[in-house]
Amino acid sequence: MSRKRAVLDTNVVISALLFRGETSRLHTLWKKRAFRIAASREIVEEYLRVLAYPKFGLTEREIKGIVQEELLPYIAPIAVAGKLTGVCIDPDDDKFLACAEAAKADVIVSGDAHLLSLKKYKGSPIVSTEKFLKMFR
Protein backbone atom coordinates (compact mmCIF):
# COMPACT_ATOMS: atom_id res chain seq x y z
CA MET A 1 0.00 0.00 0.00
CA SER A 2 1.31 3.46 -0.82
CA ARG A 3 1.76 6.04 1.89
CA LYS A 4 -1.18 8.24 2.70
CA ARG A 5 -1.15 11.77 1.34
CA ALA A 6 -2.39 14.18 3.96
CA VAL A 7 -3.11 17.89 3.72
CA LEU A 8 -2.31 19.37 7.13
CA ASP A 9 -3.99 22.56 8.27
CA THR A 10 -1.59 25.19 9.60
CA ASN A 11 -2.75 24.80 13.21
CA VAL A 12 -1.88 21.09 13.04
CA VAL A 13 1.62 21.66 11.61
CA ILE A 14 2.47 24.40 14.10
CA SER A 15 1.28 22.28 17.03
CA ALA A 16 3.21 19.26 15.76
CA LEU A 17 6.43 21.25 15.34
CA LEU A 18 6.41 23.54 18.36
CA PHE A 19 4.52 21.84 21.18
CA ARG A 20 4.71 18.65 23.14
CA GLY A 21 1.72 16.38 23.45
CA GLU A 22 -0.28 14.09 21.24
CA THR A 23 -0.11 16.29 18.14
CA SER A 24 3.70 16.21 18.21
CA ARG A 25 3.41 12.51 17.24
CA LEU A 26 2.51 13.73 13.75
CA HIS A 27 5.99 15.23 13.42
CA THR A 28 7.54 11.88 14.34
CA LEU A 29 5.28 10.06 11.88
CA TRP A 30 6.01 12.33 8.93
CA LYS A 31 9.75 12.11 9.65
CA LYS A 32 9.44 8.30 9.60
CA ARG A 33 7.62 8.77 6.28
CA ALA A 34 4.50 7.04 7.61
CA PHE A 35 2.56 9.56 5.51
CA ARG A 36 3.40 12.35 3.09
CA ILE A 37 2.37 15.98 3.63
CA ALA A 38 0.70 17.38 0.52
CA ALA A 39 1.07 21.17 0.39
CA SER A 40 0.68 23.91 -2.19
CA ARG A 41 2.89 26.99 -2.32
CA GLU A 42 0.09 28.99 -0.67
CA ILE A 43 -0.05 26.55 2.25
CA VAL A 44 3.73 26.51 2.76
CA GLU A 45 3.71 30.32 2.71
CA GLU A 46 1.07 30.28 5.45
CA TYR A 47 3.15 27.82 7.51
CA LEU A 48 6.09 30.26 7.25
CA ARG A 49 3.97 33.31 8.10
CA VAL A 50 2.52 31.66 11.20
CA LEU A 51 5.90 30.36 12.42
CA ALA A 52 7.06 33.99 12.35
CA TYR A 53 4.31 35.16 14.74
CA PRO A 54 5.93 36.97 17.68
CA LYS A 55 4.08 34.78 20.20
CA PHE A 56 6.28 31.81 19.20
CA GLY A 57 9.51 33.76 19.80
CA LEU A 58 11.39 32.12 16.93
CA THR A 59 14.28 33.87 15.20
CA GLU A 60 14.52 34.00 11.42
CA ARG A 61 17.36 31.47 11.63
CA GLU A 62 15.28 29.08 13.79
CA ILE A 63 12.34 29.30 11.39
CA LYS A 64 14.63 28.63 8.42
CA GLY A 65 16.10 25.58 10.22
CA ILE A 66 12.69 24.20 11.16
CA VAL A 67 11.36 24.62 7.62
CA GLN A 68 14.44 23.24 5.85
CA GLU A 69 15.07 20.30 8.17
CA GLU A 70 11.73 19.38 9.73
CA LEU A 71 9.19 20.26 7.08
CA LEU A 72 10.24 20.70 3.44
CA PRO A 73 11.94 17.29 3.06
CA TYR A 74 8.62 15.63 3.95
CA ILE A 75 6.32 17.67 1.71
CA ALA A 76 4.97 16.52 -1.64
CA PRO A 77 4.65 19.85 -3.50
CA ILE A 78 1.24 20.24 -5.12
CA ALA A 79 0.45 22.58 -7.99
CA VAL A 80 -3.06 23.96 -7.63
CA ALA A 81 -4.63 25.27 -10.82
CA GLY A 82 -6.99 28.17 -10.31
CA LYS A 83 -8.41 29.41 -7.05
CA LEU A 84 -11.15 27.72 -5.08
CA THR A 85 -13.51 30.13 -3.33
CA GLY A 86 -16.68 30.01 -1.33
CA VAL A 87 -16.61 26.39 -0.20
CA CYS A 88 -15.66 26.92 3.43
CA ILE A 89 -17.19 29.51 5.77
CA ASP A 90 -13.66 30.88 6.33
CA PRO A 91 -12.28 31.74 2.86
CA ASP A 92 -8.71 31.22 4.17
CA ASP A 93 -9.50 27.51 4.52
CA ASP A 94 -10.39 26.98 0.85
CA LYS A 95 -6.68 26.59 -0.01
CA PHE A 96 -6.55 23.33 1.99
CA LEU A 97 -9.53 21.95 0.07
CA ALA A 98 -8.05 23.00 -3.29
CA CYS A 99 -4.76 21.34 -2.39
CA ALA A 100 -6.50 18.14 -1.29
CA GLU A 101 -8.40 18.01 -4.56
CA ALA A 102 -5.28 18.60 -6.69
CA ALA A 103 -3.26 16.07 -4.65
CA LYS A 104 -6.05 13.50 -4.57
CA ALA A 105 -5.28 13.49 -0.84
CA ASP A 106 -6.35 10.58 1.31
CA VAL A 107 -7.23 12.91 4.16
CA ILE A 108 -7.30 16.53 5.37
CA VAL A 109 -6.24 16.93 9.00
CA SER A 110 -7.42 20.00 10.89
CA GLY A 111 -8.27 21.40 14.28
CA ASP A 112 -10.41 24.08 12.64
CA ALA A 113 -14.15 23.80 13.35
CA HIS A 114 -15.05 25.30 9.95
CA LEU A 115 -13.12 22.64 8.05
CA LEU A 116 -14.11 19.78 10.36
CA SER A 117 -17.81 20.67 9.94
CA LEU A 118 -17.55 19.85 6.21
CA LYS A 119 -16.57 16.24 7.12
CA LYS A 120 -15.44 15.50 3.53
CA TYR A 121 -14.40 17.30 0.38
CA LYS A 122 -14.25 15.65 -3.06
CA GLY A 123 -13.53 12.23 -1.59
CA SER A 124 -11.04 13.41 1.05
CA PRO A 125 -12.33 12.97 4.60
CA ILE A 126 -11.63 15.90 6.93
CA VAL A 127 -10.58 14.61 10.33
CA SER A 128 -9.17 15.81 13.63
CA THR A 129 -5.55 15.14 14.57
CA GLU A 130 -6.76 12.63 17.14
CA LYS A 131 -8.71 10.63 14.53
CA PHE A 132 -5.80 10.76 12.06
CA LEU A 133 -3.34 9.51 14.70
CA LYS A 134 -5.62 6.52 15.41
CA MET A 135 -4.88 5.33 11.86
CA PHE A 136 -1.29 4.68 12.96
CA ARG A 137 -1.96 2.70 16.15
Image (cartoon, grey):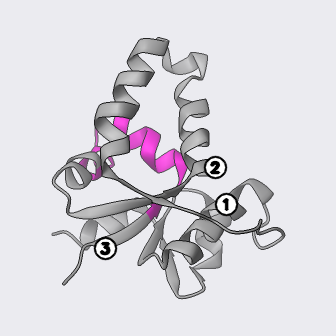
Badge 1 local density, few (<14 within 10 Å), some, or many (20+)? many
Decide: marks 2, 3 in contact (CB < 8 A)? no
Magenta residues span: 7-26
Residue at 58% in and 77% down: 101
Q: Quadrant of the C terminus?
A: bottom left
- In space, the residues marked 1 and 3 are separated at their CA atoms by 19 Å
**118 and 107: which is toward the camera:** 107
Residue position marked by numbered label 1 in the rendering: 95
Residue of label 3: 4
**x, y (%) of residue 43?**
58, 50
Q: Please identify the quadrant where the N terminus is shown.
A: bottom left
**Of pointers 2 and 3, the one earlier in the residue sequence:** 3
Residue type, mark 3 in image: Lys
Query: Could you tell me residue 29's position as x and y percent?
Result: 21, 55
Task: Between residue 47 and residue 113, name the one nearer to us.
Answer: 47
3 displayed left or right of 38:
left
Side of 54 relative to 23 (left or right): right
- Describe residue 74's horizontal placement relative to residue 57 as left or right: left
Furthest-bottom residue in view? 123
Viewer-nearest of discs 2 and 3: 2
